[in-house]
Image: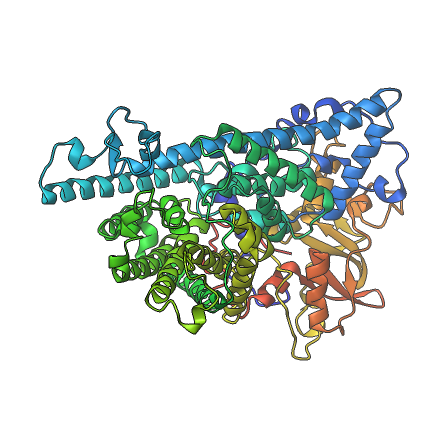
Amino acid sequence: MSGLAQTPGFDDTWAQWDETHPRMSKDSSIHTDNDDAQANFTENIEPFQYMNPWESQVDLSAGRRAYRDGATIDWTEEETVERIHKNTLRSQPGLRGVILPLLDQARIWVVLIVTGILVGFIGAWLDVLVAWLGDIRTGRCSYGFFYNENSCCSGLDAGEECNEWNTWGEYFGIRSIAGTALIQSIIYVVLAMAYSGSAAILVQSYAPYAFHTGIPEIKAANSQRLCPRLVSFPLDPLGQRGRVGAGSGFRVISWQRAQKRRILSAAASAGVAVAFGSPLGGVLFGLEELDLFARVHIMWRAFVCAVLAAVTLQWTDVFATGNLVLFRVTEGTPWKGFELFPWMILSVFGGLAGALLIRLNIAAAVHRHRSWIRDWPLMEVVCVTAFTSLLSYPIAFMRAQSTNLVGNLFAECDPTKPDYHGLCNVSSMWQNIFGLILTSGFKLGLTAWTFGMKASKVPAGIFLPTIAIGATMGRAVGIIMQGWHRAYPTAWIFSSCAPEGQCIFPGFYSVIGAAAMLGGVTRMTISLVVIMFELTGALSHVLPIMIAIMVSKWVGDAFGREGIYDAWIALHGYPFLSTTVEFRDQGETAASRMLAREHIVSINAHHSTVEELEHLLQTYTYRGFPVVDGDRLMGYITRDKLQGAISSLAEQYPSGVAPSDVNCTFAGRHDSSYEEADLSTSLDPAPMQLRPAVPLQLVVSFFQKMSPQCVLFTNKGHLRGMITKRDVVNLLRERFENAHALAERSETIFTTGS
């Protein structure tokens, strides 16, 4: 059923999936056993009697029928079923017609409110847990084992030394430098290996879809296809909270598929809002990255959910900071015009390093998938963790938790506060610069390898590691500029600086570097600007942040327009049709790429028996079939609707099985002299149609804007060919050499048949 180059193994993906995942595909009872409970107060309401001719042809059971993993979203049917559902509620007599619609809407808002509050509490709990797990690698609190370092040393005056926090060497009474270094490094490495190993075991055993960042899967599921079991509870602290939110609130409305996906963006926005203390940025992230078909009411729901999550997080205030800003920078210090030059250098670095990180990450993922490493996932996790820990421990900036590192890099030097690993020591300026650049390079390489260890199934976000890479490089440039000004304060380039006081603030250079690096990796724009200024509170420096992100995106796009999320969507072979990729044909028409009529598997509109239709479904895994009368196109029927029609027909017989010789018609019953089943109500009589002579570029644009499952090509009503969404996706990925490199028959989440 595909007119373009076929990807090996996709035609029989569902058969392989059913064999390896019987709980999720074959056993349909897990989707339908609880329909009565899920229907709740609407189960006894009769359908609205005043339906128009189109609505009367719609299968009302579609509102509750669950999609299989990877099934294509039927937008038209869903919208129609939802409209009938609302009209049915409003048509009830008396107070029922007023109360039931209100209760129906209330369920959605209850889910949003509960999800937002729940995500806020989960985020607060993760903050506490992650801080303690990170600090326990280096020491413990003398008066409470479960206190992290900040909590243990709270309440001290400025400059006062914290004696309550003991390193492991101090705790065990080791006095020698060598002995202290040995015990510290052993505990650091062992605990790091234990953390990663336990995470891998938990994900493999209980939550297989919690691996990776989750954004590519949510993005693909929310736009084109569905994977009902995809959204699960993740296990890592930062970079996954979008999926924490996305998996928090679907049980109440689990039978309303359209509403479920709309809440997906809202809940994911709440997760981003909690992860970065950025409610507005979370909403924009949901619109820019997760919801290609944005609507005002979806944005409003995302806003409510994100605000509630952020308010809950601030109300808990687990670290007693009194605000949501995670990495506050010096506010109110005006920036100088000459600083645009080093900031542009950082922006170019962010674009180049971001493109390099994507390339290295893809190469590492493909190599891992094709080598012996994929057969030893747990060993890979343990070995990579051990190597990372051994490499990180000798370098102070590598050894620190990413959140602590970024927070101290963003902060300016303050005499009343402890010097973070000598970062503010003027005499060790070049040592700090070398250490920061070395840390940036090591983190880039380690992130490229560890992000997306698919075989190992380890949860991992990309935001914080990327921010740390850019922040370290930005701080290094800031220290260089500060040292230059200190050495030559009267130079013409510093003429705008005041004679007294500080002119260069290296902390904000870290912010610029982080924003540029994040823009180069994700290729996000508006939402990233908002996230960065909410993350740092640097409202007065929004313009430099915008410039940095703009330049880094331009530089990164020169090496490929795909961000890290789109690259992983292509690697997995998810049928995600990007609306941002521009396609230019070389004078080709649709006829040169479409599947010709003689190769299309179709259904006879008048003479098709039940046996023939069942054989068709068993033989082919296509997502739908054209219905023809000779060569004249009568319509199109999806696989799910055809299966549903045959099942409904079987229910009309006492035995529960329709006779195999019963003739089925899709053109309305025309002869009552013999037994005949009318399946025309399941047929789409007006599928998307174009002429074979239209330019191929127009066909691609048509798919990007309308998102149909397939387009049929006709000439005066006669079927001449077809192109499916998978064909267009493959066409746009022809220049991406590693497309489908990680797609496996037994592990494919989304299928792409027509």
The quadrant holding residue 752 is bottom right
- Image quadrant occupied by the N terminus: bottom right
Q: Residue at x 48, y 68 (%)?
A: 338
Residue furthest front as drawn = 499
Residue 47 visible to the viewer = no
Observer-nearest of 296 and 684: 296
- Image quadrant occupied by the C terminus: bottom right
Observer-nearest of 294 and 220: 294
From the viewer's perspective, tell me whether residue 247 is left or right of residue 224.
left
x and y, in percent, of residue 365 in the image: 40, 58
Residue 671 visible to the viewer = yes
From the viewer's perspective, tell me whether residue 104 is left or right of residue 307.
right
Observer-nearest of 224 and 182: 182
From the viewer's perspective, tell me whether residue 366 is left or right of residue 288.
left
Residue furthest bottom as drawn = 587
Residue furthest left as drawn = 176
Residue furthest top as drawn = 95
x and y, in percent, of residue 70 in the image: 58, 47
The quadrant holding residue 580 is bottom right
Q: Is residue 328 above or below residue 353?
A: above
From the viewer's perspective, tell me whether residue 354 is left or right of residue 167.
right
x and y, in percent, of residue 122 in the image: 48, 32
Q: Is residue 655 above or below residue 734?
A: above
Q: Residue at x 66, y 60 (%)?
A: 724
The quadrant holding residue 42 is top right
Q: Residue at x 34, y 42 (%)?
A: 416
Observer-nearest of 282 and 108: 282
